[in-house]
Image (cartoon, helix red, strand yellow):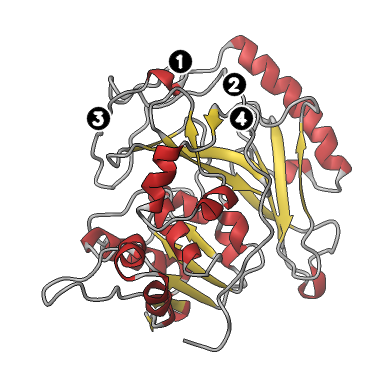
Amino acid sequence: MPPTALLHRPPPPPPCLVASNPWLNLLSLKCPNTFLPYSAEFVSGIALKSNGFRCFSHPPLSNPTAVDMDVEKTDSAKLKQKIEALGVKFESCTPGQFDLLYCPKCKGGWSSQRTLSFHISQSWSHAIWRCFDLQCGWAGQVFADNNKENPRVSRENLRLEPLDDELLGYFAERMISKETLQRNNVMQVVGGKKIIAFPYRRNGQHVGCKYRTLDKRFWQGRNTEKMLYGIDDIVDADEIIIVEGEIDKLSIEEAGYCNCVSVPGGAPQTVSVNKIPSKEKDTAFQYLWNCINYFEKVSRIILATDGDTPGQALAEELARRLGKERCWRVHWPRKDESSSFKDANEVLNSLGADALRAAIDKAELY
């Protein structure tokens, strides 16, 4: 491994607040492909619908009502005024997308390039931004209504509570420490259903949440933005590790490396033989395109996906999009003569943190 250190440990983010959740809509675990209009306290079982990827198929959202449209019109007017006050041209932004603009603070720096990633929510409720010029780094957020955060996903309305002893024990058996769980704001849904919650955050703010039961059933909260898990940990990183699950990201951190993100779910069964579609049509990897600016100045990307066939296909698809010339592939240690360990957590749990760190350090050029 090159002499450059992979260790990148940013200051711990603020803890997730425990509060009621009047809006939380989860996948119905009794009725597949529907959303519950009530909280997760009533969730008990789950059924999945395969779409060729290890992910979940959400139903289309209902059409907005006249009241919703009036609210959005009002919010857009408020947000436009605030955005233009920042020096950003409102007309250059497309709601629901990440636009690359000229930064009004540094004017693109010495390169005079578009370095500002600017995002307006689809509902016009808020905007977030970050300049990726190393000498600038301007970042922030603004809300149409100053009295609220993103009304759909925020620290105040996620119905979560700290992990209880049983779930802490569950992670301890997998060699994940309480400190690592707290730093990543891993919590559980209230109501005693033993549902683990992995909040997704950007710039310190919640943008969604992914849920998991003890028997490895997964789903995402409605309105969760498509993005990588742990994105705030790679803001200043020049080398990035990508894994295939939130627990694998936590495992990599136990090995000493915080500059790691996880895909939100969805490994292809095989590598596509087709040409990579445009960003707008590459829906299966929209989470990567929404975070692509974080990779622009990265010199080395370590792909530590699962060792099974879908995991290998995922690594190939990521490398195709990120550039194979800067991608390195992790090969997990042998378990016996006929098989290898499957992922980062298996290595951590069976061989320890030193062995996991050694596997990362021995990554080979793609």
Mark 2 surroundings: few (<14), some (14-19) or many (≥20) residues within 10 A: some
Question: Are there few (<14), some (14-19), or many (20+) residues within 10 Å of tag 4?
Answer: some
Q: Are marks 3 and 4 in contact (CB under 8 Å)?
A: no
Q: Amino acid at mark 4?
A: Val
Specify the farthest residue to the left: 338
Dot 4 corresponds to which residue?
18
Which residue occupies 55% across, 60% down?
Answer: 292
Q: Position of residue 103 (x, y in %)?
A: 79, 58
From the image, tell me which residue sits under label 2: 20
Answer with mark 1 or mark 4, whichever residue precedes in sequence.
4
Vertically, is 207 above or below 331?
above
Determine crowd level at label 1: few under 14, some 14-19, many 20+ residues with C-alpha closer than 10 A: few
Vertical comparison of 20 with 234: above or below: above
Residue 47 numbered tag: 3
Question: In this view of the protein, which residue sits in the foreground, 1 or 12?
Answer: 12
Q: Which of the two discs, 2 and 3, labels the residue nearer the N terminus?
A: 2
Residue 183 visible in rendering: yes
Packing grade of label 3 (10 A; few <14, some 14-19, many >=20) is some
Which residue lies at the image location 65% right of the left edge and 62% below the top edge? Answer: 235
Mark 3–mark 4 distance (CA, rounded to whole Å): 28 Å
Residue linked to disc 1: 37
Q: Secondary structure at mark 2?
A: loop
Look at the numbered disc 3 and give the secondary structure of its residue.
loop
Query: Which of the two discs, 3 and 4, labels the residue nearer the N terminus?
Result: 4
State the separation of the CA atoms marked 1 and 4: 20 Å
200 with respect to 145 (left or right): left
Seen as rendered, the residue at the extreme right is 85
